[in-house]
Amino acid sequence: MILVTGASGFVGRHLVAQLLGQGLAVRCLVPPGRDVASLTHAGLPRPELAGGHLLDEESLYRAVTGVHVVFHLASAQWWGRTRDLQRYEVAGARNLVRAARAARVGRIITLSHLGAAREAAWPLLQVKGAVENTLRQSGLAWTIVRSAMAFGEDDSFINAMLLSLRANPLFFAMPGQGEVVLQPIHVDDLVQALTACLDRIALVDHLLEIGGPEYISLRDLLRTLMRLWNMPRLLVSVPPWLLRRMAVLYSRVLPRVMLNPQMLDLLAISRVTGLGNAWTNFGVRPRRLEDSLLHWQRDHGWRRLLQSSLRPHPRGVPG
């Protein structure tokens, strides 16, 4: 049995589908009241659902009982403030380790970010570094996969930029000069790498990095989106500190903002790794960004913009 935390999230949904497609038994840790429709896939068996969350140690122990591998993906990065990140991710990881040790779980595989470190200058990367350290010192077998930004049609990264472009027909407020270099990886390629960890014993107790097959600056990424979606805008350089204050202000007005502090953390520095890491470490040949974007639907109009801005983030606890 394989347990997936954060199963209702962006990467989690794709991972659950991949595991079920391989005929594996999957259990999903799902907080009460969370929408589980996204975990049902046509032609695939339904995963087992375990009600609970990372901060409820009793329900967490029930979820890990009988499990041999945990994929730990639960995260508050797209909606939580700094205190939420500390509480949910760091404390949640500690609770997961305690429950996994008690239930004699064989291994924990977790997803982190390129640039994660406890001494990093940005809160999200600090928190991810603390989670990594918790797993390394857990006494359990572990694998940590540090990933570049994952993208896909239902992501919170590319779509946030597209909706921001749609919201302002004149210009796009770009952090700094757009000089940071990114290495986006398609979510299906990332999921393929995660599932490859199950069969590669050599990856046990290793920290690995993965990214897409190309480097691209933030400025060039925005130009690509504007060209493909036919939304020409003036790119205006704005100091990152000012954008952070604007994001905090917007979050007090709207339930969901398109450029939150956590995304600004991820765009603060160039976060790249070797272009061949996906193949060398996992046997995965990642697809190019623009080749994937060409097949996306072009539904980024005002209706979707309003739905995205007014739809509240999941509050309470992470999956």
Image (spheres, rainbow, N blue to C red):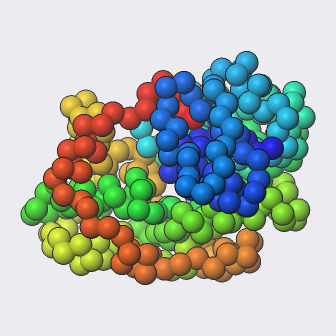
59 to the left or right of 115: right
* Number of numbered discs visible in the structure rendering: 0
Q: Quadrant of residue 180?
A: bottom left
Residue 265, percent across and down?
A: 44, 50
Q: Is residue 179 above or below residue 157?
A: below
Q: Quadrant of residue 167?
A: bottom left
Q: Is residue 6 above or below residue 252?
A: below
24 to the left or right of 163: right
139 to the left or right of 189: right
Residue 19, percent across and down?
A: 70, 56
Residue 113 shows up from this direction? no
Taking the spot 14% from the left edge, 63% from the top edge, the residue there is: 171
Could you say which is closer to the camera, residue 35 or residue 258?
Answer: 35
Residue furthest out toward the left: 170
Q: State the quadrant of the N terminus.
A: top right
Taking the spot 67% from the left edge, 30% from the top edge, the residue there is: 50
Residue 247, percent across and down?
A: 28, 42
307 to the left or right of 99: left
Taking the spot 66% from the left edge, 43% from the top edge, the residue there is: 47
Residue 108, percent across and down?
A: 78, 45
Q: State the quadrant of the C terminus.
A: top right
Could you say which is closer to the camera, residue 18 or residue 183?
Answer: 18
Taking the spot 53% from the left edge, 78% from the top edge, the residue there is: 287
Residue 13 shows up from this direction? yes
